Amino acid sequence: NAGVTQTPKFRVLKTGQSMTLLCAQDMNHEYMYWYRQDPGMGLRLIHYSVGEGTTAKGEVPDGYNVSRLKKQNFLLGLESAAPSQTSVYFCASSWRTRANNEQFFGPGTRLTVL
Amino acid sequence: SQKIEQNSEALNIQEGKTATLTCNYTNYSPAYLQWYRQDPGRGPVFLLLIRENEKEKRKERLKVTFDTTLKQSLFHITASQPADSATYLCALPGDTGGFKTIFGAGTRLFVKA
């Protein structure tokens, strides 16, 4: 099993450009998440999904959109990138109910917006 | 809102010693607390979960305590090794549902040989 994979691994954008980050998981998890991680700050939840076809806003959703058309995929879109969106983005997934509520993370996407 | 505090200063210890990391939280009474490990350039990896009715939990060289009165968890690595060098994140369930998690900023641990 590949676990959680993310593409691309690195990306440089100019202000105003758009892009989509792709997350895929092969563990049949119901829940999926997008986080951003900035220096000195904890992981902050951008959007999440509790099932195929459903999404919800997290702590810092502005400037991002998401879609979950298939259970195994969760896409994060930036419609008009801004320098403040320079960050490392992590996707994670988890089962709906498990004793330890463990989240499985992807390797991250390092995004720089110039 | 909930707040998690971890020591932002890196912890440097000698190989073989016990490393102790602290996680404090406020405005919250979580049902459980988690610890994750994050290596540079990688995503976090789950290590342990401790529930509010558990005072202590162990896994190999790891030991976690949970004091709901002090609102604090301590994470210990005994007989530390250079391979234990990483950032350790404390995490709590969000108050709106168990599937949302709030993470601390983490404490960087360096174990010197």
Image (cartoon, helix red, strand yellow):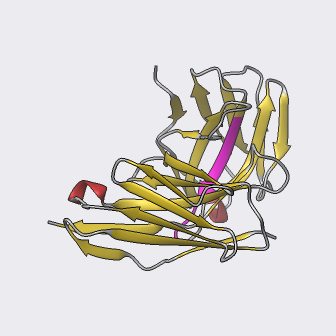
Give the number of marks.
Answer: 0
Is A32 situated above or below B46? above
Q: Is residue B17 above or below residue A56?
A: below
Q: Which residue lies furthest to the left in this view?
A: B113
Q: In this view, does A46 lie to the left or right of B76?
A: right
Question: Along the line of sight, which residue is nearer the eye, B29 or B44?
Answer: B29
Seen at 61% across and 39% down, the residue is: A92
The structure residue drawn at horizontal position 79% and vertical position 23%, both measured from the top left corner, is A52
What x and y, as percent, mark residue A60?
76, 58
Q: Nearer the viewer, residue B56 or B29?
A: B56
Q: In this view, does B91 lie to the left or right of B27?
A: left
Q: Say which residue appears at 22% left-offset and 58% top-offset.
A: B81
Q: In which quarter of the image is residue A32?
A: top right
Give the percent coordinates (x, y) of residue B85.
Answer: 30, 60
Looking at the rendered image, the quarter that the N terminus of chain B falls into is bottom right
Residue B25, image x and y in percent? 67, 72
Percent across and percent down for residue B43 are 48, 47
Residue A38 colored magenta?
yes
- The answer to whether residue A33 is seen in the rendering is yes
Is residue A34 placed above or below B112 in the rendered structure?
A: above
Which contiguous range is marked in magenta?
A32-40
Magenta region's main secondary structure?
Answer: strand
Q: Is residue B7 above or below residue B73?
A: below
Can see residue A11?
Answer: no
Q: In which quarter of the image is residue B15?
A: bottom left
Q: Does the magenta stretch include residue B98?
A: no
Question: Is the C terminus of chain B in the top left, top right, bottom left or bottom right quadrant?
Answer: bottom left
**Nearest the eye: A103 or A75:** A103
